[in-house]
Image (spheres, rainbow, N blue to C red):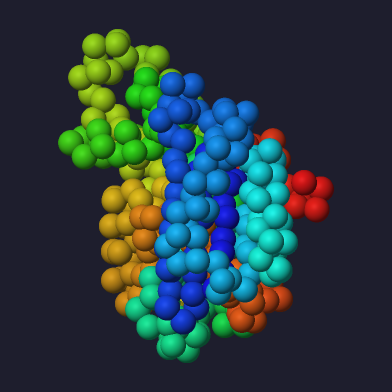
Amino acid sequence: MILALESSCDETAVALFDPARGMIGEWIHSQIALHEKHGGVVPDLATREHLRNFPPLLVSARAHDGFSSVTEVAVTQGPGLAACLAIGVAAAKALALGLRVPVVGVNHLRAHIFSPFIKLHAEDPAKFTSVFQGRLPHLGLVVSGGNTLLLELNADLQIRILSTTRDDAAGEALDKGAKLLGLGYPGGPLVEKLALTGDPRAFDFPRGMGGRDILDFSFSGLKTSLRYCLEKMAVPEVQARLPDICASYQQAVIDALMRKMKFAFERAAYASIGLSGGVANNSRLRSAMAALSLRKRIPLYLAEPRHTGDNAGMIAFAAWLDRTGVDRASGLVMEIDPDATPENSATDPAQV
């Protein structure tokens, strides 16, 4: 049994995972309502809330299944907000000491990469490894507020990062676009809601970096294009055409993501594709991935909604994969810009 903790940003989360049965329980406290009035996550407030919420979540987890079967405590070691990560690491060390079990750190992005396969494991834990091997090599897309990654999980169970964003992440572009439109926080879901009744072809926004020889993403130009578009429109016109603007802006993000997926298929063949991260909840993006899956005639693995955002379930699952030897040697090798967004700030748990 693995007891996992997650506190990389503004979600306090605990999970219990049994490899023989799957997820035993997951508990999470979201701080969205707290940070909404500030227009984004305030690190000091997030840290305070982690201190406040870990104890009741752990009490609930212990009451649900007890900790007597726990053999390992897993905790997010980064990337994330340094002070928030410190709370989780401290709590994990204390629990491991009290339970007399080892504590292991898990890379938050690696956990996202593997999260689409949690449902596959739940369907038949005993056969998971053999079925999983049959779905490799795997092409995965991780899209969140702080990260956008295109990656390959190959037949040797090695993770290779094919591309990242050179500036804004996809979720960040949606949130910043929502802010320009005065929609509030978190912006991505608000853009999606308004886009449902809009025309995605009404406005011609850029699709980021071009050429088949470049797999990297770029969304800063899209955000700038929206700002210039809004400057040319009167306020009443913006309000009247808000659904069309949101639909067109959202479609530009999705088209940029899907184009790079298609370019990746021109370079190699894959046995499956996957989608994870907070933006993976976007229904139009999920539909685009489903269409690609049908065209390529390969299975699509979508992270379940509860495992798309920051959650402890995916941390436990990734820790188990390490403990059983799956992808033990690979880790996650990539360059992270610590100045891009708070979520991109990697933290060494030893320094914490």
- The residue under the point 38% across, 42% down is 252
Relative height, residue 150 to residue 193 (above, below) = below
Q: How far from the left and from the top, in percent, is residue 300?
A: 36, 70
Q: How far from the left and from the top, in percent, is residue 6?
A: 56, 52
Relative depth, front residue between 186 and 232: 186
Residue 126, quarter of picture: bottom left
Residue 178, quarter of picture: top left
- The residue under the point 49% across, 50% down is 57
Tally of numbered tags: 0
Relative height, residue 337 to residue 160 (above, below) = above
Q: How far from the left and from the top, in percent, is residue 238?
A: 28, 18
- The residue under the point 42% across, 62% down is 64
> Which residue of the protein is positioned furthest toward the right in this rendering?
351
> Which residue of the protein is positioned furthest toward the left in this rendering?
197
Relative depth, front residue between 292 and 183: 183
Q: How far from the left and from the top, in percent, is residue 100?
A: 71, 68
Q: Which image quadrant: the N terminus? A: bottom right
